[in-house]
Amino acid sequence: MRWYLWFVIPMVRADGPDITRSAAGHVALEMPLLLPSALLPEAGVRWEAVDERSARVRLMIGREELVPVISVAPDGRLERVEMMRWDPDGMNGIPDYVRWVGDGFAEERTFAGHTIPTVVRVTKKADTPQADAFFAAVIESAQYR
């Protein structure tokens, strides 16, 4: 993992099994939001109905099996993505899986044939007193190549 300020100044450098597991979870959470076509059965993804508006998606990223639950509104719009994701800090400073939730998908647009939410909110440690509104964004454009 490498984070840069203004693409120039290195801010974070980390690696190891905890970072790899966490990164796999990051990818699994982003797939339904930004690249839904990556969740087709042809890509090795297995879908299981939870109820009439939710499905559990089983996918492998590296050596990690990840299982996001995707919920849609009655009109088919993405409503919520939730998943247990590896967190090197866990709930009490001990590495463990914690619940991450993506929701707040108030709007969506289609870019190059992919309809995605353009308002996104992701909460770490969701549904706990330690819940952290970890990420929020408005997507103005997207390019698919």
Image (tube, grey):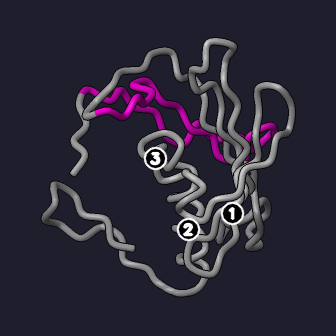
Cβ atoms under marks 1 and 3 closer than 8 Å: no
x and y percentages locating residue 2 in the rendered image:
33, 72
Q: Give the Cα separation between the discs numbered 1 and 3.
A: 17 Å
Is 127 magenta? The answer is yes
Marked residue nearer the N-terminal end (3 or 2)? 2
- Name the residue carrying label 3: 37
Secondary structure character of the magenta stretch overall: strand
65 sits to left or right of 49: left
Are the residues at dot 3 and dot 2 in contact (C-beta closer than 8 Å)?
no
Residue of label 1: 66
Establish if 40 lies above or below 107.
below
Q: Secondary structure at mark 1?
A: strand
Residue 41, placed above or below residue 50: below
Residue 138 lies, in percent from the top left, at: 36, 26
Image coordinates of residue 104 in percent, x first then y, are 57, 23
102 vs 83, left or right, is left
Distance Cα–Cα, label 1 vs label 2: 8 Å
Q: Which mark is residue 76?
A: none
Alpha-carbon distance for marks 3 and 2? 17 Å
Q: Amino acid at mark 3?
A: Ser
Q: Earlier in the sequence, mark 1 or mark 2?
A: 2
Quadrant in the rendering for residue 118: top left
Instruction: Look at discs 3 and 2 and give the one toward the viewer.
Output: 3
Image point (22%, 58%), residue name: 5
Indicate the amino acid at tag 2: Ala
Give amino acid for label 1: Leu
State which region is magenta.
113-140
Q: Is residue 55 magenta?
A: no
